[in-house]
Image (tube, rainbow, N blue to C red):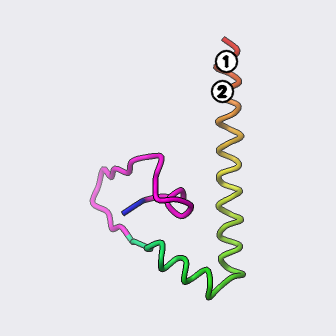
Amino acid sequence: MEFGEMAILEHSRSADVFADTPVTCLELPLDSFADYRRLHPETSLKIMRNLAAILARRLVLANAKVDLLSAY
């Protein structure tokens, strides 16, 4: 089982998930998400655009950190 938005794009992940309290985890298998995308193209486009926006913001922040660290 993979967690997070990166698992939607590929079968790997960039972080671990830990909980301090009991939690319920819901699973959406990639095959089911692929079926959903075929059946609901407009909604899945919105999901993928939102995902792209989140990842783009993270990339901008990561680049800013690299610039800051390389200034030293």
- Looking at the rendered structure, the kind of residue marked 2 is Val
Q: Is residue 4 shown left or right of residue 51?
A: left
**For residue 61, what is the image quadrant?**
top right
> Which residue range is magenta in the image?
3-25
Residue 51 belongs to magenta span: no
Gap in Å between the C-alphas at discs 1 and 2? 6 Å
Residue occupying the far left of the picture = 22
Which of these two is toward me, 12 or 22?
12
x, y (%) of residue 22?
27, 60
Q: Which residue is mark 2?
A: 66
Question: Residue at horizontal 29%, vertical 55%?
Answer: 21
Question: Residue at horizontal 33%, vertical 68%?
Answer: 24
Q: Is residue 16 shown left or right of residue 64?
A: left
Q: Is residue 13 shown left or right of residue 37?
A: left
Say if 36 sits above or below 26 in the image: below
- The tag on residue 70 is 1
